[in-house]
Amino acid sequence: MKIKVAPSILSADFSSLGKEIKKVELAGADIIHIDVMDGHFVPNITIGAVVVKSIRKVTKLPLDVHLMIENPGKFIDDFVAAGSDMITVHIEAMSSAKLKAQSAKLKKQGIKFGISLNPATPLSKIKNILNFVDFVLVMSVNPGFSGQKFKFEVLSKIRELRSIFNGDIAVDGGINDEIAKKAVFAGADILVAASCIFNSNDYKKTIRRLKNVR
């Protein structure tokens, strides 16, 4: 199983965001993870589709736009138009019926669709929609801020998910070398890392270590 690394720009230096993104691309990143927060679904505010459109100009890597917002269905078209390759929404913010309809729409557009769930949300909440998504993003911290500590109880959720789901499983929050190894062993194959990468002195070495944590 190939491990992919998705640097989350939440910990990047926004005063030189384009340069930061190019640096992680050259360092071996597979995906650029973009956290969109509205101050309602999570207690923080980040960026919108206008910034995603600018990011699209500076990298050829897939852009995974993680919508941590209320009423995500109202904004998905804007983020697709801005250049997103992957859209991730939260099961806590969208009904199963709307998720299934959105999945069909995005599939026609060639956009990958993912579902995310918070640490306290049981896996049972997404079991009935796994056939409609390309990947699952398991939150290993409470969403909203970078630099939180990994919640080890989500490892059992990843293990159970891997036993019933053949698509990609991403894990997001508190990732470092030691925790990445545990997450991969449990079944994750996409590591979303923010401060672990952007606070390091050598992006390339950090990304290489994450890809080879077995």
Image: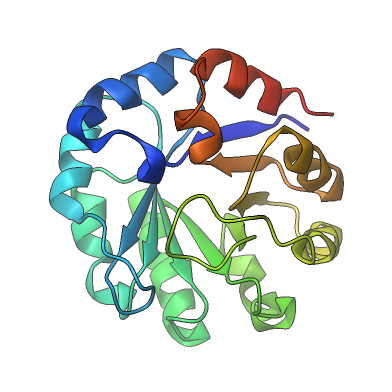
Which quadrant of the rendered structure holds the C terminus?
Answer: top right
Residue at the spot x=48%, y=76% of the render?
100
Along the line of sight, the residue nearer the viewer: 105 or 56: 56
The percent coordinates of residue 53 (x first, y second) are 17, 42
Task: Say which quarter of the image contains residue 26.
Answer: top left
Residue at the spot x=64%, y=55% of the render?
149
The percent coordinates of residue 191 (x first, y second) are 62, 41
Along the line of sight, the residue nearer the viewer: 39 or 111: 39
* Residue 58 horizontal side relative to residue 156, left or right: left
Residue at the spot x=64%, y=67% of the render?
131
* Residue 151 horizontal side relative to residue 142, left or right: right
Task: Say which quarter of the image contains residue 141.
Answer: bottom right
Which quadrant of the rendered structure holds the N terminus?
Answer: top right
Using the image, determine if residue 71 lies above or below residue 154.
below
Give the total of numbered labels: 0
Residue at the spot x=28%, y=64% of the render?
76
* Residue 193 horizontal side relative to residue 70, left or right: right
The percent coordinates of residue 10 (x first, y second) are 38, 46
* Residue 1 horizontal side relative to residue 167, left or right: right
Q: How is the image coloured?
A: rainbow
The percent coordinates of residue 189 (x first, y second) are 70, 41
